[in-house]
Image (tube, rainbow, N blue to C red):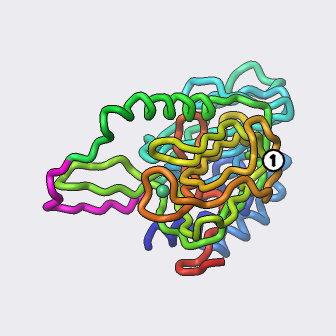
Amino acid sequence: MQLFEMNRRSSTLKKLLFVGWVLLLGASANANANASASASAQDEVLANELQLTGELTQGSLIRGTLPVGSEIKLNGKNIKISSAGDFVFGFGRDAKLNHVVEYRLPTQSAFQKKTLTLSAREYDIQRIEGVAKKYVSPPAEVTKRIQADNRKIAKARATVSDLTAFQSDFILPSKGRISGVYGSQRVFNGQPRRPHFGLDVAAPIGTAVVAPADGVITLVHNDMYYSGGTLIMDHGMGVSSTFIHLSKIHVKEGEVVKQGQLIADIGATGRVTGPHLDWRINWFKERLDPALLVELPSAGSVD
Ligand SMILES: [Zn+2]
């Protein structure tokens, strides 16, 4: 419940353009303060060369622009920047809280340095004691298959394209009940399981899955061991969406798709307990929270 509240605030926040450092607001600011900050920010937009959109928190995708010909580094590593000055990076579930951004305009000889401080997330952790000691691991004969699946997924997520579709607003790819959130984790008998990294939308098999933003399809697989029908699309410069447990996929690898276009149907394939879409967002290997990018339906709503 707490996480839903936070996500709702975040999706309001992402409507605003955050400029520079002063206006990268945490989730605690109220909506009115944000609105007036945004209005007064309009004047600063022209004066401030570095523009960032996103919430400075763990799991967040940060999108930005700099003047044409600029360079940017994150924690000492070069970040790809488009010919128009677009760039993007993301912070994982348990990312450290302090990061250093350095950027240099074409007119400057030295890099300017800024520190980004993330807010720490509180994830939904369920501690369950007294779980039977049955260790659930996949049967040996499927190990090779799982490794092959993982290699294909890793390859698709390593795609570096010049697309800048990630700069647009994203939309929720399916209608349904939000049945699982990013970052949640179960701890059985004190042993943490793998956290959940997707946003789950529960809906009947056959429910439409549409593209949350423009992009190019980089992976289509109808039967992966864990994820079943699996689709990955590239939104540019390392940002990808992954959709899993699909019953049907309507697009092919290499296909260019537009936001809102039907790409697949919800299913219950792979290792699942019921039909749902599990939608993930990555910046390369970093697993990010899709809920920070979209408006979520209010709890219990099916529209
Ligand atoms: Zn899921």
Q: Which residue extends farthest top?
A: 109
Q: Give the residue displayed 71% in from the left and 65% down from the top.
A: 37
Three-letter amino acid code of the residue under disc 1: Val
Quarter in which the C terminus is drawn = bottom right
Q: Give the residue displayed 48% in from the left and 61% down from the top.
A: 181
Query: For this rendering, which residue is in front, 51 or 141?
Result: 141
Which SS type dominates the magenta stretch? loop
Q: Quadrant of residue 158?
A: top right
Q: Is residue 193 left or right of residue 173?
A: left
Q: What stretch is highlighted in magenta?
A: 120-134
The spot of residue 187 in percent (x, y) is 26, 55
User: Ligand 1 closer than 8 Å to the CB at disc 1?
Assistant: no
The spot of residue 201 in percent (x, y) is 56, 65
Q: Give the residue displayed 68% in from the left and 50% down from the top.
A: 249
Residue 91 in the magenta stretch? The answer is no
The spot of residue 160 in percent (x, y) is 70, 29
Q: In this view, does 173 lie above or below 65?
A: below
- Report whether residue 224 is seen: yes
Q: What element carries label 1?
A: strand
The spot of residue 18 in percent (x, y) is 70, 54
Q: In this view, does 9 lie above or below 237?
A: below
Quarter in which the N terminus is drawn = bottom left
* Residue under numbered circle 1: 257
Q: Give the residue displayed 79% in from the left and 59% down from the top.
A: 260
